[in-house]
């Protein structure tokens, strides 16, 4: 039975997520706290727990339900994740072979080589160039967007699937990270000129900010990021994770993946784009959401 009167709906995806947490032996209280931290209204969260777990209680400790996605240990959300079983050096996707260059568990970081061809990178930049504008980020108070001094790049967003090339890249990302296209935002393109940078930040929406509830209504939290390097500067422009001392040098065609199963600094995913000192840096970013970004 759906609750119609509440502003946030108890969706099948939410119920599936709750079941997965219960299967992973998370206490009901911890599931509630995680939902509240992701911006769910307290009443909706409690109603969803009751609706989902009461009928399932009898079978909760039986074998895992086959249709549920694997969840990481603890009480986090399911996240995108490449299939790295057997520690392959190369992943053979439907349309491209991608190298696995670096993996890290905490924070979850994977660097891929040859994710895009030089021609694809150049074509994406050509599509984006006429539409670039000074980058905006989500305004914490309202959920709208604002020009942000912490990000001095120029940027634009493509609509999902708006051109054949965009579709091809989105399908490749979905295959690589085992995450459906419709749970992703449109591709964002950023251009950094000399002096431009992106100061360290988290990509998830801060649950403590008043604008976050509005943003989460469309697709829920961000749970993963893929940064694709389209053009590299002569100097500077590395992607850095200051909490773990990791710096990834931009290389044309490489793609840097990281995921975060909860909107919390304990994920270790604080990251930034170092200042470009010579030349231009271009990236495409795909953010993946918990739910369908409709
Ligand atoms: O361009 C980058 O290296 C970078 C760094 C941090 C991109 C993003 N964040 C992003 O697009 O979220
Ligand atoms: Zn970022």
Image (tube, grey):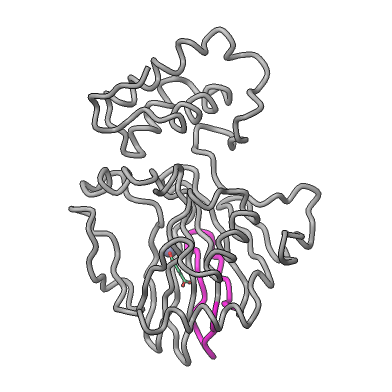
Q: In which quarter of the image is ligand 2?
A: bottom left
Residue found farthest to the left = 142
Residue ID at (33%, 19%): 47
Which is more toward the observer, 276 or 228?
228
Q: Where is residue 48 in the image (x, y as percent from the top left)?
A: 37, 22
Look at the image and say whether residue 44 sits in the magenta stretch.
no
Look at the image and say whether residue 248 sits in the magenta stretch.
yes
Q: How many labels does the image show?
A: 0
Which is more toward the observer, 151 or 78?
78
Which is more toward the observer, 241 or 75?
75
Q: Position of residue 270 (x, y in %)?
A: 44, 58
Residue ID at (63%, 23%): 65
Q: In this view, does 11 lie to the left or right of 258?
A: left
Residue found farthest to the top = 58
Q: Where is residue 32 in the image (x, y as percent from the top left)?
A: 38, 26
Which region shows up in magenta? 230-251
Relative vertical location of residue 285 with respect to residue 127 in this rendering, above or below: above
Q: Where is residue 256 in the image (x, y as percent from the top left)?
A: 58, 65
Q: In which quarter of the image is residue 98?
A: bottom right
Q: Quadrant of residue 69?
A: top right
Q: Is residue 171 left or right of residue 281?
A: right
The quarter of the rendered structure image containing the N terminus is: top left
Residue ID at (59%, 34%): 73
Q: Is residue 42 left or right of residue 292?
A: left
């Amino acid at each position: 039975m759906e609750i119609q009167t509440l502003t946030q709906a108890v969706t099948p995806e939410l119920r599936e997520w709750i079941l997965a947490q219960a299967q992973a032996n998370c206490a009901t209280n911890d599931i509630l706290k995680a939902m509240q931290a992701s911006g769910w209204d307290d009443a909706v969260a409690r109603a969803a727990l009751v609706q989902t777990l009461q009928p399932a209680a009898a079978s909760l400790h039986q074998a895992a339900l086959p249709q549920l996605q694997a969840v990481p240990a603890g009480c986090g959300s399911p996240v995108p994740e490449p299939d790295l079983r057997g520690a392959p050096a190369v992943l053979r996707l439907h349309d491209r072979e991608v190298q696995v260059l670096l993996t890290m568990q905490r924070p979850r970081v994977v660097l891929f080589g040859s994710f895009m061809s030089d021609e694809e990178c150049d074509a994406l930049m050509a599509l984006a160039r006429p539409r670039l504008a000074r980058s905006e980020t989500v305004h914490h108070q309202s959920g709208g967007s604002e020009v942000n001094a912490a990000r001095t790049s120029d940027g634009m967003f493509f609509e999902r699937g708006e051109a054949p090339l965009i579709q091809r890249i989105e399908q490749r990302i979905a295959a690589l990270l085992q995450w459906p296209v419709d749970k992703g935002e449109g591709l964002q393109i950023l251009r950094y000129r000399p002096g431009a940078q992106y100061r360290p930040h988290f990509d998830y929406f801060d649950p403590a900010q008043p604008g976050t509830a509005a943003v989460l209504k469309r697709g829920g939290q961000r749970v993963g990021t893929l940064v694709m390097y389209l053009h590299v500067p002569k100097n500077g422009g590395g992607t850095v994770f200051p909490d773990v001392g990791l710096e990834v040098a931009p290389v044309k065609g490489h793609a840097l993946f990281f995921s975060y199963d909860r909107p919390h600094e304990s994920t270790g995913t604080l990251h930034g784009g170092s200042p470009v000192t010579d030349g231009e840096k271009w990236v495409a970013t795909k953010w993946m959401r918990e739910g369908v970004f409709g």
